[in-house]
Amino acid sequence: MKYTLDATNQSLGRLASKVAILLRGKNLASYMPNELPDNEVIVKNLKSAKFTGSKFDQKKYYHYSGYHSGIKARKLSELWESKPDHVLRQMVYRMLPVNRTRDKIIKNLKFN
């Protein structure tokens, strides 16, 4: 099934949880956790999504390379300007179950 979601004036966390539920197929009566659903979710107007509180200016994402002093921090505002689809993809990716199907399920998330 194909689902199309409009991100205009929606909170990003709530949108990500909706996308995760649709990708897994938990909204269907035929849901089985051991089978991969054939659902595709398309998100439109991602740039017009909203952030609540002061997360947009204060939230930081960290990346550690494994080397000494290899930790890097980027603000959400910097990431959102350059790659808004990457931000939502990572949010949904972390909401999916940590097993072999996660990489296969996230491929069905598209942006328009």
Image (cartoon, rainbow, N blue to C red):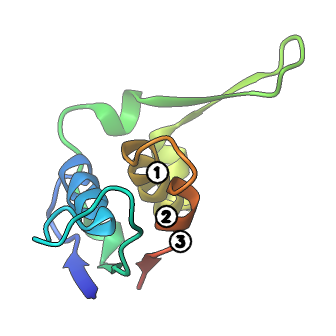
Q: CA distance from mark 1 to mark 2?
A: 6 Å
Which image quarter holds the C terminus? Answer: bottom left
Could you classify mark 2 by the number of other residues whose Cα lies within 10 Å: few (under 14), some (14-19), or many (20 or more)? Answer: some
Could you classify mark 1 by the number of other residues whose Cα lies within 10 Å: few (under 14), some (14-19), or many (20 or more)? Answer: some
Label 1 or label 2, whichever comes before in sequence order: 1
- Residue 7, percent from left and from top: 23, 70
In the displayed structure, 52 sits above or below 33; it is: above
Mark 1–mark 2 CB contact (< 8 Å): yes
The image shows a total of numbered marks equal to 3
Quick one: SS at disc 2? Answer: helix
Quick one: SS at disc 3? Answer: loop
In the displayed structure, 32 sits above or below 29; it is: above
Amino acid found under the numbered disc labelled 3: Lys
- Residue 66, percent from left and from top: 84, 21
- Residue 14, percent from left and from top: 18, 51
Considering every residue shown, the one lying at the far left of the view is 29
User: Which quadrant of the figure has residue 23?
Assistant: bottom left
Residue in front for this viewpoint, 100 or 61? 100
Amino acid found under the numbered disc labelled 1: Tyr
Residue drawn at x 35%, y 39% is 56
- Residue 77, percent from left and from top: 46, 45
Q: CA distance from mark 2 to mark 3?
A: 4 Å
In the image, which disc is placed on residue 106? 2
Residue drawn at x 19%, y 61% is 26
